[in-house]
């Protein structure tokens, strides 16, 4: 079997890259270890930066997002019991974010790929990228017990944090940067009306809380919980009681509660691997970096990696510019590290840390108070939240 670009992983990174390449007339095949139903059952984040919204439009998969997504011009920060508005639109000269779930982005991309006749092999096993440093790399995999060899020009490792792509690069060729936080997020999805028309990020001495949404009738709420907590120990009632306790009274009083549709705990981690290219293999999205969800950057960083790799592959195939591939890692990493910094900062400012001393606690409270009280501070929060610009490929 042969294609120009072999893509490992049918999450948002792999599907979006596949769709853009398809539109540009560059052939590609996607290999995914799970079933389509499994991929669609994962509940992930739901805030899209303007850059990602524009990229989805360019890929021709934005109709439902434009019809059903909610444009948010701001969000709220709560600390010391007070609500503070961050006016994204005013502070960034008109930029905003789009509330539209990652699951829906994935569904739209799957639909578009099917309609375009793009090839995706689901439920494949033992995917193995090979001959990465040669001009004829390939990916072998097993489908229905048979071994298949997919020959290609380039391989895109879009297979997430636990994927095989990063692991197939020799360890001594990579440098890993990592921080694991001593807590996780307990998330609940419910068919209840949102407590507020904008997202609310709340710092509280009992821990962080976030009020998010998927639509005017579906909410996504989160609580900071200890790293060892078990989801079985959190009844719906306990979740709602704790959430209300961490919010100002006027929000808690109007909170509509209901049965959870989904409930899960995710650990918080910052992770970056350098470089993001080895020979003809590129790492894209979660395969190369993880951010804690506090800045809503995970999916958006995957989109900017995809945009950069797509631009590079267009230069390779349309202009014969094979040298362009050497720019991939450096361009991506400059933007990634800025989002890593912002996500780490938001996490540090808003969460309760178990071993902070009294001085450290006051400094943290003061830093947040200073940033939010100053126009310069609010501007830096806003410009990072709506997303820093994508860098061009030379
Ligand atoms: N072989 C084939 N497919 C694999 C393999 C493998 N060895 N390992 C993992 N996969 C698949 C997973 O099943 C998954 O469908 O790769 C896909 C990776 O998808 P995601 O984990 O969603 O990663 P990505 O597409 O980069 O999406 C960006 O940013 O912060 C996050 O929530 C955000 O998940 C989102 C991510
Ligand atoms: C979500 O809606 O799941 C969400 C929103 C904002 C975040 C993280 C998660 O910062």
Image: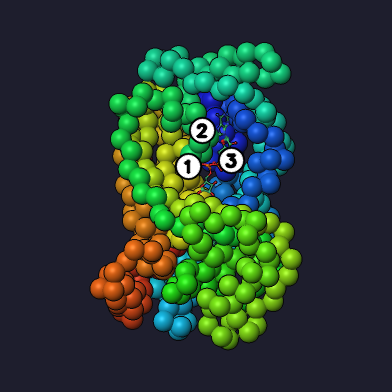
* Badge 2 density bin: few <14, some 14–19, many ≥20, Cα 10 Å: some
Residue where numbered disc 2 is placed: 163
Dot 2 beta carbon under 8 Å from ligand 1: yes
* Res. 141 image quadrant: top right
Q: Earlier in the sequence, mark 3 or mark 1?
A: 3
- Proximity of marks 1 and 2: CB atoms separated by less than 8 Å: yes
Comes first in the chain, label 2 or label 3: 3
Q: Is residue 52 visible?
A: no
Residue 32, image quadrant: top right
Residue 76 vs 166, above or below: the answer is: below
Say which quadrant the N terminus sits in.
top right
Q: Is residue 251 left or right of residue 359?
A: right
Label 3 sits on residue = 11
Between 304 and 367, the residue placed more toward the observer is: 367
Estimate the spatial distance between the alpha carbons at disc 1 and disc 2, rounded to whole Å: 9 Å
Question: In the image, is the residue at mark 1 within 8 Å of ligand 1 by its beta carbon?
Answer: yes
Does residue 89 appear to the left or right of 325 in the view shown? right
Q: Residue at x 50, y 17 (%)?
A: 138
The location of residue 124, given as percent across then percent down, is 64, 25
Please name the residue that numbered disc 1 is placed on. Answer: 286
x%, y% of residue 281? 43, 26
Mark 1 surroundings within 10 Å by alpha-carbon count, few (fewer than 14), some (14 through 19), many (20 or more): many
Q: CA distance from mark 2 to mark 3?
A: 11 Å
Q: SS class of the residue under badge 3?
A: loop
Q: Nearer the viewer, residue 245 or 232?
A: 232
What is the x, y in percent for residue 79? 42, 78
Secondary element at image label 2: loop
Whether residue 34 is visible here, answered yes or no, is yes
Closer to the camera in the image, 31 or 235: 235
């Amino acid at each position: 079997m042969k294609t120009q670009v072999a893509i490992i992983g049918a999450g948002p990174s792999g599907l979006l890259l596949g769709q853009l390449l398809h539109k540009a007339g560059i052939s590609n095949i996607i290999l995914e270890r799970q079933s389509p139903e499994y991929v669609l059952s994962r509940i992930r984040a739901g805030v899209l930066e303007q850059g990602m919204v524009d990229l989805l439009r360019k890929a021709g998969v934005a109709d439902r997002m434009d019809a059903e997504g909610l444009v948010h011009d701001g969000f709220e920060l709560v600390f010391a019991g007070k609500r503070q508005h961050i006016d994204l639109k005013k502070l960034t000269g008109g930029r905003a974010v789009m509330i539209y779930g990652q699951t829906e982005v994935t569904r739209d991309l799957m639909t578009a790929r099917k309609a375009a006749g793009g090839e995706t092999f689901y439920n494949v096993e033992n995917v193995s990228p090979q001959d990465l440093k040669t001009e004829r790399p390939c990916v072998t995999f097993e489908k229905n017990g048979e071994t298949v060899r997919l020959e290609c020009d380039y391989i895109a490792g879009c297979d997430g944090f636990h994927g095989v792509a990063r692991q197939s690069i020799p360890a001594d060729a990579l440098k890993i940067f990592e921080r694991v936080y001593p807590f996780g997020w307990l998330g609940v999805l419910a068919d209840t009306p949102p407590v507020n028309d904008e997202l609310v990020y709340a710092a509280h001495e009992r821990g962080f809380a976030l009020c998010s949404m998927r639509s005017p009738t579906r909410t996504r709420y989160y609580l900071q919980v200890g790293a060892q907590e078990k989801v079985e120990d959190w009844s719906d009632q306990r979740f709602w009681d704790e959430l209300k306790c961490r919010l100002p009274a006027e929000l808690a009083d109007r909170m509509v509660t209901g049965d959870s549709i989904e409930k899960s705990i995710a650990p918080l981690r910052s992770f970056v691997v350098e470089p993001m290219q080895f020979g003809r293999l590129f790492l894209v999205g979660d395969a190369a970096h993880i951010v804690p969800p506090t800045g809503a950057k995970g999916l958006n960083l995957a989109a900017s990696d995809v945009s950069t790799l797509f631009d590079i592959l267009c230069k390779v195939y349309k202009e014969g510019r094979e040298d362009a591939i050497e720019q991939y890692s450096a361009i991506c990493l400059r933007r990634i590290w800025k989002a890593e910094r912002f996500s780490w900062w938001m996490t540090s400012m808003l969460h309760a840390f178990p071993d902070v001393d009294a001085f450290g606690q006051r400094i943290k409270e003061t830093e947040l108070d200073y940033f939010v009280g100053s126009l310069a501070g609010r501007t830096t929060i806003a410009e990072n939240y709506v997303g820093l610009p994508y860098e061009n490929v030379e």
